[in-house]
């Protein structure tokens, strides 16, 4: 079954921007996997940009920081959209894998409203 775009016109988010946000979220599982596969170097921070070309540990630290920032955007937007409703994990799963939460402890309309709010918040966080 073909996935339909959601209408975010109420939030002044056009179809192209929605799709950009949607595919940003779809990369989340890959980012998590990539971070899990990176060796842990004791949280070492890169010393300077000039040394990064010769220092693979510094490159990894910068990459890990970037992946963490991106994952954090998705997670923060989900937490803000959830607003204590207990739907955070369902919301993250839904926006990152493209399937609707079948066992979400709320009605479909409420869940769709949460998803729309999530994309509105993510749009503002990404600016």
Image: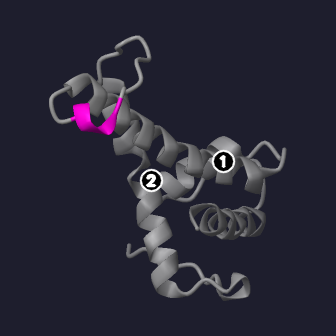
| Residue 87 seen in this snapshot | yes
Q: Position of residue 117 (x, y in %)?
A: 72, 67
Label 2: few (<14), some (14–19) or many (≥20) C-alpha neighbours in 10 Å: some
Label 1: few (<14), some (14–19) or many (≥20) C-alpha neighbours in 10 Å: some
Which residue is pictured at 36% across the width and 26% down the height?
47
Q: In the image, which disc is placed on residue 76? A: 1
Q: Is residue 19 above or below residue 9?
A: above
Which residue is pictured at 44% across the width and 72% down the height?
20
Q: Is residue 102 above or below residue 114?
A: above
Q: Name the image quarter holding the N terminus.
A: bottom left
Which residue is pictured at 76% across the width and 52% down the height?
80
Q: Nearer the viewer, residue 94 or 9?
A: 9
Q: Name the image quarter holding the C terminus.
A: bottom right
Residue named by callout 2: 97
Q: Position of residue 95 (x, y in %)?
A: 53, 57
Give the spatial CA distance, label 1 vs label 2. Answer: 17 Å
Look at the magenta stretch and give its main secondary structure: helix
Q: Is residue 59 magenta?
A: no
Q: Is residue 12 above or below residue 118?
A: below
Q: Quarter of the image holding residue 51?
A: top left
Q: Is residue 4 above or below residue 107?
A: below
Labels 1, 2: front one: 1
Q: Quarter of the image holding residue 61?
A: top left
Which residue is pictured at 43% across the width and 74% down the height?
3
Q: Position of residue 34 (x, y in %)?
A: 31, 34
Instruction: Determine whether the residue tagged by mark 2 lies in a helix, strand or loop.
Output: helix
In the rendered structure, which segment of residues is drawn in magenta? Answer: 48-52
Q: In the image, which disc is placed on residue 103? A: none
Instruction: Determine whether the residue tagged by mark 1 lies in a helix, strand or loop.
Output: helix
Considering every residue shown, the one lying at the far right of the view is: 84
Q: With 26 as the anchor, is 117 left or right in this view? A: right
């Amino acid at each position: 079954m073909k996935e339909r775009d959601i209408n975010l016109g109420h939030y002044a988010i056009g179809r192209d921007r929605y799709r950009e946000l949607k595919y940003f979220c779809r990369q989340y599982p890959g980012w998590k996997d990539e971070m899990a596969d990176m060796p842990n170097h004791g949280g070492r921070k890169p010393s300077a940009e000039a040394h990064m070309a010769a220092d693979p540990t510094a490159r990894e630290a910068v990459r890990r920081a970037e992946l963490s920032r991106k994952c954090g955007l998705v997670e923060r937007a989900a937490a803000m959209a959830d607003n204590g409703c207990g739907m955070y994990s369902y919301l993250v799963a839904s926006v990152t894998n493209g399937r609707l939460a079948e066992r979400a402890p709320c009605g479909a309309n409420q869940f769709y409203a949460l998803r729309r709010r999530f994309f509105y918040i993510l749009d503002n966080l990404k600016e």
